[in-house]
Structures are given as structure tokens and as C-alpha cells.
Image (cartoon, grey):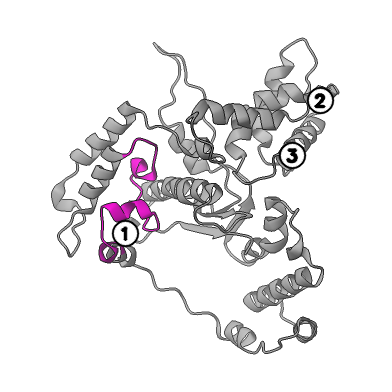
Amino acid sequence: MDRLNVKFKEEIAATILELKKRDSPITMKDMLESLKKEIVDDYKVGDDIVQTEREWRLRIAEVAKAMDIKLKRHSPEHKNIVRKLIDQQSKSLGDSSSTTEGSSMLCKKINPDDKRTVVEIYEQMDEERMWKLSSGKIVEKEMMKMVERCKFEHPCHSFIFDTEDKNWLDFFTLEEINEIKSYNVREMPKLPENFSNLLDNIHQSDMNDLHKCLSTKYFHPKNEAPCHWAQKSVLEGIELHMFDFLKDTEYTERDLMSRIWRLILTSFNHSRITIREEVPSAATKAQMNRKRRLSTLEPMKRKLKSKVPDHIMKFGTYEIGLTEGAKLDDETGNKFLKDVMFKTPKLLKDMMSKLNEVAPHKKNSLRAVGLVTSRK
């Protein structure tokens, strides 16, 4: 089981063990319905639901096989279960008058008590330590106004200020947004000279000539790691074009990450930073379950599960970044708003909080990196 590279394997294994307590055989339908929360949370607006169900059935079958558990064959009417689960969730969360695709999955009303708690935290802040812009406007006070105005959950309720979120233009001018964005920006390191030379010397306009030219060069995987990675990545990209992979419209998000954006994974081969695919964020999991205690007067709360990004970057045991991939490149689409503007900043904030706990003396220089990829 430990070597099994299956997304949500821990959740699937726990569900199998729970269902195993019953006397009746376990069916695929039982598994899918029991994993409703994970399925709905993992579903991304714009994904092919048929493909989503196929992937979930495959995950469940692989974990069951690894656990030596036989699932009872399901009847024909047990098809399209994932579609029904997603439709049910959309109806339960959404406005019945809304017909926008997937909009209900993006609109979770903020609990009034939670909202009040966040406002109280802002009110208790020391104004002398708040961020005052050159215009005289105080950032934290404007953020509190946003919190008070919101009827639905927004990153501001997690004390996140994303300068790409256009909602902030109701509270700040473009000049003020740019001042915030440019504050304490870290200078990017220069590329190694041999790496720059490799890229600068690419002049061929024909794919076949370029492939032939790059294939004649040799770069040692360890001693010349940056150039080796760049050469390999460009060659693989050329081959995708040669075989018309990018013209195919049937590929899944997983295909994109494993074929096109594989270069992200291989870029860390020579690094002390490791990168892993489709694993839950430990920082977010710890944050979500920070109030969990043994049962006393109240029963012990159910352990919450964290969101799963496409990649997580780690330095030792510390999470320092993530990537999110998408099939779409529409900055107004549900997929972009849900994963890029909401999920990713919250995961990064949890990583930053954890890093700040272990290295508070570096709080002004710590960074967590979020990399967003798309089809284009």
C-alpha cells in the first residue's frame, strides 16, 4: 500500500475498512457514495464527469486490490453515480434560481459567527503595527471592510490579500494595489551562463531541424543539470508537437500534468527540494484539525481532510510551494476562480503559517510559491 501512487488512497482505504465492518459485500456504488465529499471536492468545474467517474472507479479498484478486498460487481443501473453526487451537491449548496454552470460550487455562504470572529481579530490588531500606504490608507482596515461586506466565503476571511483579485479595486486604487504588489519583492536569481547560452543559441525555426540540433548536444545529468533539464524538456515538447498531442481535445488534466507539465517534476531532480504529485497538504490538514481533542463533554470531532493540489514542493519536512494545473485558460471561468483564486491562496497561507511557526525570526523573508499551469 505504501508504494501505491493513487490519489486519495488513504481516504479510500479508510472507507473500505469502514464498510468492511458491515456483513454485506462492498460494492462500487457503496464506495462512491461513501466518498461523496472527496469526489465533490476533487471535481473541478469543466472536467469531464464521465472521465472523473472512470478515474474514481480506477482508484478504488487499485486500492481494493492492494488491500486484497474483492468488490461485488455492480448492476448496470449503478452507472453515472458521480454525476448524481455532483448534481445533488450543486443543488444543496446553490441558489435554485442560478443556472450558471457550477456556480453553486463556488458560492458558500459565510457563517455569521465565523464572520464575527474574523472581524473581532481585525478590531484587536494594533493600529501602530498596521500597514499604512503612501496614500495614507491602512490595508488591514480596508480588509476588515471587505470581510464585513462579504456574504460568501472569500480568501479575506483567512486574512489573505491577493492583488490579482479584482474585488479589491472596490477598496484600493490601481496605484495602491501596485504599491502592495511591489512591496519587498525578491529579485530573481540570474540564470547560469551555460543555461542562458543554450537557450540563446536556439535559432532554428523548423521543428525537425531544432530537434536534430538539440539531440547532437550532450549535457551530464548531474554535472550540467540545468542544461540537461532544459534540453530534455524542449525535446519532449517538440515531440508532443510532432505527434499532434496538443491538437487532441480528449486529454484529461492528468494527461496535461504528466505529459506537458512533466518538466516541473523533472526540474527538481538535482535539487534539495522534493516535489510530489497529488498528496494532501500536511500544513492545511494540521490547520483544519488544530482544535481537535479527545472526547470529554463533547464528542471528538471528525478529522477533516485537506485539499489536494497537483504538486507539493517540500524542503525536508516543510512544505514550501505547490502547483495547480488546468485544462482551461479562462481567468473568468469557474475552474480558474475556484482553484487558482480560492484554493491555491488558502493552501499557500497554511504553508506560510507553518513555516513562520518554525522560523519566526525569518517571517519577513519567508516565501511559499504557487505555480499555476494551463493548456496554453
Q: Which circle, 3 or 1, is nearer the viewer?
A: 3
266 up-or-down from 337: above or below: below
Rendered image: mark on residue 364: 1
Q: Which circle, 2 or 3, is nearer the viewer?
A: 3
Q: Are marks 3 and 1 in contact (CB under 8 Å)?
A: no
Which one is nearer the viewer's eye here, 118 or 286? 118
Residue 358 left/right relative to 310: left
Which one is nearer the viewer's eye here, 179 or 322? 179
Q: Secondary structure at mark 2?
A: loop
Q: Which residues are magenta?
A: 150-177
Q: Secondary structure at mark 1?
A: loop
Q: Residue at x 70, y 75 (%)?
A: 234
Rendered image: mark on residue 50: 3
Q: CA distance from mark 2 to mark 3?
A: 25 Å
Amino acid type of the residue tagged 2 in the rendering:
Ile
Q: Residue at x 55, y 28 (%)?
A: 91
Residue 219 covered by magenta stretch: no
Residue 10 left/right relative to 113: right
Q: Earlier in the sequence, mark 2 or mark 3?
A: 3
300 up-or-down from 94: above or below: above
Q: Secondary structure at mark 3?
A: helix
Amino acid type of the residue tagged 1 in the rendering:
Asn
